[in-house]
């Protein structure tokens, strides 16, 4: 059946596939208009933890959204049940291309014909995982940062996405307290991630060249930008192994990028100092 955009969004649930760090936060945002969010995760524990996370936070987050009211999350271990009637599916399973490809085939087979299929992938354009999808016009990237605190999101076509989906999301998503910005052509890292990558890279270069220290860069950043943390503290929170993976990914596409920032990160990673998760990174006050 041909795809047409869903007309009755107001009365239909959103389904979230994969409810780890990001999936549960995405579920939380879609529970802020009084309706139901469905959660499907292959781990029962992760699904249950996500449901509890939504229940604990939804009243407060919904109260900060105009017209918001607390909804609820329902967990199921049956993907078809999670998808039934949903107007939107947001996939947030681990960043593995083979997994994304097979999940998209499954979502396309099981979802209602007018369901929009969106991926939270950080580094893969959805054009790379639609091999098994019969209706690529309903697939796109929808990349969240760290809701409910960081609520700007990137959206990007898979090259076939129906224009009406992008228009619909631009209208609907702000009602859930999230604000989409369209990458107008395919771009690894979308919009904001690329800009943030450049800030991280130059901060690392300044330290790798011996010009400054992580602590001084962060203090300058905090004083001049008025933010509570600087780039090095923020990298420690994400995990220096993850930051290195991301930078390596950019370097494959852009071999002209300087190696100094990656070499500095690698020293920390090789020493097992990954940031907050190991108790030590650029800072050592996480114990
Ligand atoms: P995570 O490992 O915390 O969570 C992934 C969840 O998916 C787990 O709960 C796991 O049990 C579940 N899962 C694994 N295989 C599954 C399957 N076949 N079906 C259903 N569930 C399955 O990962 P995350 O950090 O939340 O990242 C998920 C996605 O979000 C990735 O594509 C990542 O690039 C993207 N992302 C992550 C961040 C971040 O800061 N962590 C930010 C933006 C985007």
Image (spheres, helix red, strand yellow):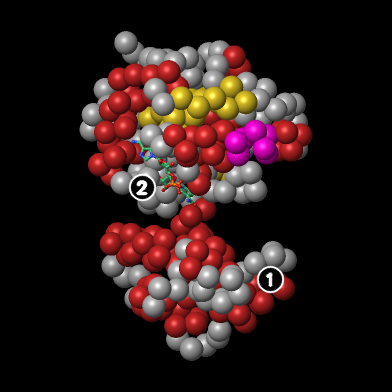
Left or right: residue 188 versus residue 67 is left
**Some atom of ligand 1 lies within 8 Å of the CB belonging to the residue at label 2:** yes
Give left or right: position of 255 versus 13: left
- Write down the residue under mark 2: 95
Image spot of residue 32 (x, y percent): 66, 30
Q: Classify mark 1: helix, strand or loop.
A: helix
> Which tag, 2 or 1, sits closer to the chain's start?
2
Q: Taking 81 as reference, is 198 above or below it?
A: below
**In which quadrant of this rendering is ligand 1 seen?**
top left
Specify whether residue 164 is in view. no
Residue neighbourhood size for the residue with mark 1, other residues' Cα within 10 Å, grouped as few (<14), some (14–19), many (≥20): some
Residue 237, visible in the rendered structure = yes
**Which image quadrant is residue 267 in?**
bottom left
- Residue found at x 45% / y 69%: 274
Q: Nearer the viewer, residue 164 or 242?
A: 242
Q: Assess disc 2: are there few (<14), some (14-19) or many (≥20) residues with their C-alpha within 10 Å of its C-alpha.
A: few
User: Quadrant location of residue 160?
Assistant: top left
Quarter of the figure that contains the C terminus = bottom right
Q: Position of residue 171 (x, y in %)?
A: 60, 28
Circle 1 is placed at which residue position?
222
Q: Give the magenta part as a residue range.
A: 52-58
Q: Residue 202 versus residue 117: which sits nearer the camera?
A: 117
Tell me the CA gap for discs 2 and 1. Answer: 32 Å
Left or right: 216 with respect to 93? right
- Residue 38, which numbered label? none
């Amino acid at each position: 059946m041909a795809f047409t955009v869903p007309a009755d969004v107001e009365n239909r649930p959103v389904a979230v596939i994969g409810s780890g760090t990001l999936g549960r936060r995405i579920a939380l945002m879609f529970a802020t208009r009084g309706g139901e969010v469905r959660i499907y995760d292959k781990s029962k524990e992760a699904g249950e933890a996500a449901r509890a996370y939504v229940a604990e936070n939804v009243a407060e987050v919904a109260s900060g959204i105009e017209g918001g009211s607390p909804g609820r999350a329902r967990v199921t271990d049956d993907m078809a049940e999670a998808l039934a009637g949903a107007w939107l599916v947001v996939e947030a399973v681990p960043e593995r291309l083979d997994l994304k490809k097979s999940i998209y085939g499954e979502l396309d087979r099981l979802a209602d014909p007018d369901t929009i299929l969106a991926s939270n992938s950080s580094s893969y354009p959805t054009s790379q995982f639609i091999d098994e999808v019969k209706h690529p016009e309903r697939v796109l990237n929808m990349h969240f940062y760290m809701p409910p605190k960081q609520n700007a999101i990137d959206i990007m076509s898979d090259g076939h996405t129906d224009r009406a989906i992008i228009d619909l999301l631009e209208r609907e998503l702000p009602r859930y307290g999230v604000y989409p910005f369209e990458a107008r052509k395919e771009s690894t890292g979308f919009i904001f991630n690329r800009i943030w990558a450049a800030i991280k890279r130059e901060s690392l270069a300044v330290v790798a060249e011996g010009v400054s220290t992580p602590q001084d860069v962060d203090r300058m950043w905090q004083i001049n930008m008025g933010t509570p943390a600087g780039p090095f503290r923020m990298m420690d929170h994400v995990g220096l192994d993850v930051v290195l993976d991301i930078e390596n990914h950019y370097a494959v596409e852009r071999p002209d990028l300087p190696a100094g920032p990656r070499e500095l990160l690698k020293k920390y990673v090789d020493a097992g100092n990954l940031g907050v998760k190991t108790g030590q990174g650029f800072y050592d006050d996480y114990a």
